[in-house]
Amino acid sequence: MIIVSVNDRLGTKAKVPCFPSDTVKMFKMQVAAMIGRQPHEIMLKRQSERPFKDMLTLEDYSVSDGVQLDLELDTGD
Amino acid sequence: MASAAELEEANRIRVSLGMQPLPVPGAAPVSGPIFKEADDGEEPASTIESRSAQGFDNWQKLEAEKAAKAKRAAKKEAIRKEVEKAARFAKLEGKGLADSEEEEELDALTWLKQQKKRQRKLEKERAKREAAEEAERKKQQVDYTAADLAGVKVGHELGEFDDGEQILTLKDTAVDVSDEDELENADLREKERREERLKLKKKKPAYNPNEADETGAILAQYDEEAKKRFTLDKQGGAQESVGLLSEGSNAKGVPVNLDILMEDAPPPSDYMDAPTFKMRKSKKGKPKTARKRVADDEGLLPADSAAAGGRDADTAMEGAGSTAGRPTKRGISDTDFLDDDELQAQLARHRQAAMKRKKVLRPEDIAKQIREGSAADSLPGVMDHGDDNEGGMVINDMKDFLENIQKEKEQPVVRKPKPKKVVVEVNSPSPYAMTPKDDAMDVDQGSPAVDDTGAPMQSVSALLAADANAEEMSNTGLKNEHTFNKGLGATLAILKDYGVLDTADTRTHEAHRARQRFLAEKAKRAEEADRNARTQREEDRRNGKLDHMTAHQREEHARKENERREKEESQEMARIFEKNYKPNVEITYHDELGRDMNPKEAFKHLSHAFHGKTSGKGKTDKKMKKITEERRQLAESTLSSIKSANDAKRQKGAGTGPGVRLQ
């Protein structure tokens, strides 16, 4: 089990316990449940990298315990 | 770390999303069996978990394998050790030295009894072996006799063998060479090789220029030595066939020395021989009265004869007749030489006489002579047959060449300074029919072939002394040039000659001198005025003129005095200026290369400077080219001695050429 912190640097901050084998989509659902925003409006990315894709797992992105991900608004395009 | 409450919250979400709940550390492990997920048609090891599980399995398998291998190796090692141990301690089989030969022990009696039998057996064996050897030998002898060796070549000369038995072996040759067998003696061959090596070690040069007799054996070094061989016949004798044959084929015929065709002496010259020169010692006490007469060719005549000029006519010509030594000619001395035709006719006659003396040889005569020579073996026509090793070269160019060189060596050319003037006053019509009465005889010897006195050397030194006077004028009659090797003055003169150094004209020098004089005078005048002022002030102070004045009056007085003095000085200066000052104002412009600019160029330069703009690239290039050309010409004229011609040419080119004049 790992704990991943999600932060949009505008005041929204969350620590999400999860498995590395969780898909990004599932992770987004958890984040959405925690911060009260629709999962399709959530975009996750490492700082200055491409946004995470839903079908890959956190492990694929080498997300380990204590990693902080940037939370942004996904406008759909 | 998230707290248990948070985890539970998260788990709630996860479960609601249909995900695996997170393990809560405080909570009891999941009760009941945990089932594996059903295989839903995915290929094995497609998920991370299954893959990691498989990885662990693999690792375990590898570990097990490794352990098994180590175990097997240990077992093998143990077995090997056991086998070695067993082998080490196994008892050796077979009979030892100490073991008896036979099973039953032999007592001395039986051994003695059997001894005879054993001896007989040994004897029989030996006899059999000897018989076999004999038979073998016999068979060999039958097989190989001297007759078999007939026709076999032996690679030595007969004379090489010394007395005693000789062992000949087959010569070592290549297998594929289908040559006949050749026998050779290893010792002899070795000896030959050794001799050859020694010969090579001597390093005798093939060509010896100092060799006394030049038989011209240079090419002989490349000759191949004829192989000496003989062939065995049926009786074991030798017939020297091969050697003779090869010698016959290599023979170069009878070498004939053609030196007999050459004359013993070189062909006689058309001219007479150089005279034998007899010098007479001068008598010291004689007065030198007639010295003026021979002054002209003082350097040409030997000093002795010059000194002898002072003697009276009889003694002088007694010397001249023998020393000047025109050879006395047999039979033709009565002829006169008047011009070249006469001389030629004379020479032709001389030649004919010489030819008549010479025996005419016809070819038949030569052949006969050679034949006789070969028969008698003592004539020079045929060379000695014994030393035809020297190559047999008889005619060769090298010989002629060397002979010529030696001839030159024998008659070294005496370099004699070329005479300036030859005065031959011959009273008698024929130089050959000279009589002692020819008193005014100044003869320049054509060739001073004097070998035992220093007279020629003296004459040379005298000539040099005479030349020293005429050194200024060269042979061409032109004035000799200055050379750099005579110091700074000469160098300056050369530079001035070629116009490299501008010799400032005297006017500028004068002006400079005048200016310096003027400046000196001015300085002197100023100093004098200074001194005058100082003495006047001293005097004023001394005679108490200033004592009854107030400070103000004193100052006033000093000022007045100064003014007066200055006025006087300036008047004096004005006078001097008027008299002496002649300013010479010259405004010269120099460009950045240090050249003088003429007014036009100067104006151009000023204009360019004023407008801040210069000529274009083309014009600048042209200018630079012109400048370099000027410099080059200057340098050229320094070096070449025909500066004036050069100048003329240049001016001509400038005047007549179609080119544009550049400024």
Image (cartoon, coloured by chain):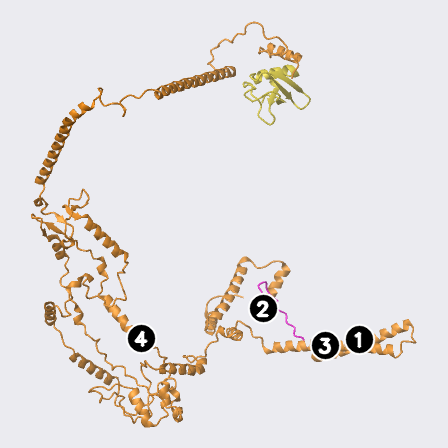
- Residue B390 x, y percent position in the rendering: 20, 62
Q: Give, as a single range, the part of the protein colored magenta.
A: B582-596
Q: CA distance from mark 3 to mark 4?
A: 79 Å
Q: CA distance from mark 4 to mark 2?
A: 67 Å
Could you say which chain is coloured orange in the image?
A: B
**Which mark, residue B412?**
4
**Which mark, residue B598?**
2
- Mark 2 surroundings: few (<14), some (14-19) or many (≥20) residues within 10 A: few
Kindly identify the amino acid type of the residue bearing the numbered disc 1: Glu
Instruction: Specify which label sits upstream in the sequence, 3 or 2.
Output: 3
Of circles 1 and 4, the one toward us is 4
Q: Say what secondary structure mark 2 lies in.
A: loop
Query: Residue farthest to the top?
Result: B32
Instruction: Specify which label sits upstream in the sequence, 1 or 2.
Output: 1
Kindly identify which chain the residue marked by label 2 belongs to.
Answer: B
Q: Which residue is mark 1?
A: B566
Q: CA distance from mark 3 to mark 2?
A: 35 Å
What colour has chain A? yellow
Give the quadrant of the N terminus of chain A: top right
Kindly identify the amino acid type of the residue bearing the numbered disc 4: Pro
Kindly identify the amino acid type of the residue bearing the numbered disc 2: Asn
Kindly identify the amino acid type of the residue bearing the numbered disc 3: Lys
Q: CA distance from mark 1 to mark 2?
A: 44 Å
Residue B587 magenta-drawn? yes
